[in-house]
Image (tube, rainbow, N blue to C red):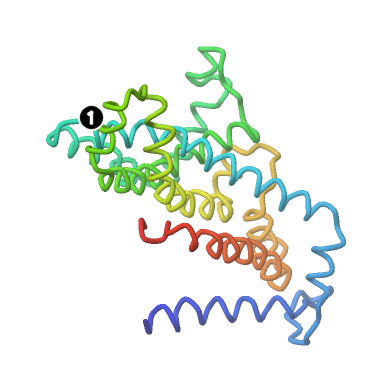
Amino acid sequence: MLWLGVAYLGALGALFLAAFWTTNEFTGDLVKVFTLDNFRQLLQLPVYRTITARTLGVAVLVTLVDAALALPVAFFMAKVARPGLQRLLVIAVLMPLWASYLVKAYAWRGMLSQSGPLSWLGISPGYGLTGLVVTLAYLWLPYMILPVYAGLQKLPDSLLEASADLGAPALTTFRRVVLPLVFPALVAGSIFTFSLTMGDYIAVKIVGGPTQMLGNVVADNYGVANNLPFAAAYAVVPVLVMLGYLGVVRRTGALENL
């Protein structure tokens, strides 16, 4: 609690305090005078609204792609595979997490390049928004599979057997029995995929082409433009989005599946 309260929340509070400061346009030094200019700039300039909307759209799309991929994989792991194979599949899902983020991102840069394997097959989207969604969906997929797998393990097999005995085909059972019960686990996984995508800025630089996302605008203003107050003000946006999302998620019971 001390670490969380001082090292994390204290640093976050100091960052948000800087959002109400400004910088000297000639020297670049911090001017610790209360002002709302940074937030006015965010609201008044259309480019920042566009970047925010794009970031939200990419986060939602990555979450939906991961959910669609995670459901069949997690269902096979939890309900079809034998115990020995189940353990091997869990290890296989976890193995990508052992590799460096940068290694995986640059691997996808090679895959998406004009001379990469996907180009040989004629299906490469290249660098840009589509390539970014593909890369981020791959990077965060284990964070969606594991909560869904845990949720499906809690699903009694007797419910599936009862549905089959009543004459329901497999798709009907999945839609009316499995999906409603595993929905909180899907929402729990979406917390990871959505929040990690909202804050990502490295993959954007590696495979995003000219695409701008909220995270790399914050990073550029802090590291390149030396404008900490504006970077801090823009960093408030994903925090508010995630607080609102977590408030909604709490009512689904999804936090119990984390």
Number of numbered discs on residues: 1
Q: Which amino acid does label 1 sit on?
A: Val
Front-lying residue, 192 or 11: 192
**Can you tell which quarter of the image residue 163 is in?**
top left
Image point 51% across, 53% down: which residue?
Answer: 196
Can you name the residue that lies furthest to the top here? 121
Front-lying residue, 241 or 156: 156
Can you name the residue that lies furthest to the front here? 166
Mark 1, Cα crowd under 10 Å, few <14 / some 14-19 / many 20+, is few
Can you name the residue that lies furthest to the left here? 84
Is 251 placed above or below 23 here? above
Can you name the residue that lies furthest to the right here? 44
Please state the horizontal and vertical placement of residue 167, each as a whole percent of the image.
Answer: 33, 23
Please state the horizontal and vertical placement of residue 27, each as a whole percent of the image.
Answer: 79, 76
Image point 51% across, 41% down: which residue?
Answer: 136
Is 143 placed above or below 67 here? below
Q: Quadrant of the N terminus?
A: bottom left
Q: Mark 1 points at which residue?
A: 80
Image point 61% across, 26% down: which residue?
Answer: 126
Front-lying residue, 128 or 36: 36
Is 171 placed above or below 34 here? above
For label 1, the SS is helix
**Can you tell which quarter of the image residue 18 is in?**
bottom right
